[in-house]
Amino acid sequence: MIELPSDFCQRMEQMLGEEYQVFYDSYRQPRTQGLRLNTAKVTPEAFLKQVPFTLEKIPWARYGYYYPEQQRPGKHPYHEAGLYYIQEPSAMAVVELLDPQPGEKILDLCAAPGGKTTQIADRLQGKGFLLSNEFHAGRAKILSQNVERMGIRNAVVTNESPQRLAERFIGYFDRILVDAPCSGEGMFRKNPLAAEEWSQQNVVLCAVRQLEILQAAASMLKPDGRLVYSTCTFSIEENESVIEQFCRLYPQFEVENVQGNTLFSEGRIDWGNGAETICRTFRLWPHRLRGEGHFIAVLRKKDGETESPQLYQSKQVERAVLQQYEAFAAEYLRTSMEGDVSLFGESLYLIPSEMADMQRLRVLRPGLQIGIAKKNRFEPSHALALAINQQAFVVSADFAAGSPEIMDYLKGQTIASEGEKGWCLITVDGYSLGFGKRSAGVIKNHYPKGLRWN
């Protein structure tokens, strides 16, 4: 069993009373494992027919499933093809309550490593605009990689402070998610290191930072827009208290009365300084459901100002570069790629139609990278391979998930394959995995070095 901090245990006993022992005993149980399907790539019906894992539906997540601890779907080629995202089951509840709709403009303000961002993108169905932001540079890179793996076209990834974004996007977003950095008490079972690093002082510091992030988010939401605040911690200071303070400082916001799953518990009014609407918030307790600890509050903005930031103006692409891409597309792509093409360094990107001006902001991924313009040639990107399906590319080579060819490809090795010379989309059981280039009966490997299996 995980060794829980004594101060944490004392506080939880005060909070839970006679229920505390059941809560404490839950840490003797193994943590739950979950994955969420990427319906942009596979339907639940198709996936469940060919899935090599034992899955059980998560009751509060539309496309979420439990899997046994001994099975490792993160080490399967389907994971590299972006068919699913490994995600803690309780965490899937947050976006379900955000309830994004196709065509909306959504901000995920603290988005790394990308579980909730990719869930939002799945709900948008490729329509609308998703801005995924992460303040810490290293985590922002991981976020960008996960956006790429899931084949998302209409997302932009930034590495900015919430305050900098708030200067640019006043009243711009239909929905905002603040999955705030927290003391991580709800993840002690998943991450024992979090228990070792826990302190009451850090709880207080997190609460201050969380309120600051919410304040930045407040101005970026449209009137009548929805803001969801979530943490993976139990402390009152970081949960009910933060929401009570925020609603008192910003009376144009109210806690919305939405229906959660019957396994969710209500926030307690006495933990929210007597604010009656605190009972509309949700707590997910590890001893009451199969998942880790979470807190979720759904807020509605009753009024406020709106502005329309200038839309991004595509950088003019040199005619020679554009011709290289157009020649590649004419030879290999069966479907047209919607969006403006813009050049960032050597990389060509398809820019989402709703993308605002991003000048002077740190942008890691300004849309879908389609390739690199090299001297006298165009090389398609790994992101493009993961954003299209087998039917969209003229030449493909398909191999079974357990085949030696797929294992060799994921390790960066060449594959013996007869067929048409040139670029080839490598697929696993029909799902896009990456590019190769065939010549003289061999496919040269173009799987990115940083992703290759050992």
Image (cartoon, rainbow, N blue to C red):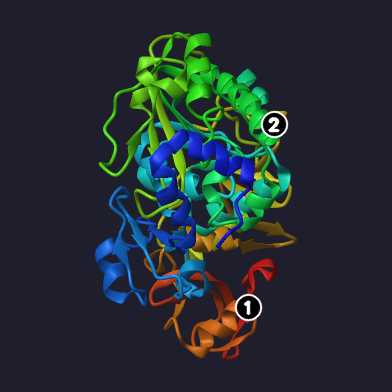
Task: Indicate whether 9 appears above or below 305.
Answer: below
Any part of residue 418 in sight = no
Between 381 and 57, the one lying in front of the other is 57
Viewport quadrant of the C terminus: bottom right
Residue, disc 2? 361
Image-quadrant location for residue 208? top right
Q: Mark 2 or 1 closer to N-term?
A: 2
Query: Amino acid type of disc 2?
Result: Leu
Q: Which residue is rendered at x = 29% and y = 44% of the image?
A: 263
The Cα–Cα distance between marks 2 and 1, rounded to whole angstroms, is 35 Å
Task: Locate residue 277, reporting x and y percent.
Answer: 36, 18
**Residue that appears at 50% across and 82% down:** 420
Residue under numbered circle 1:
445
Task: Report which quarter residue 64 is drawn in.
Answer: bottom left
> Whole-percent x and y of residue 8?
59, 41
> Tag 1: residue type?
Asn
Circle 1 Cα neighbour tier, 10 Å, few/some/many (<14 / 14–19 / ≥20)? many
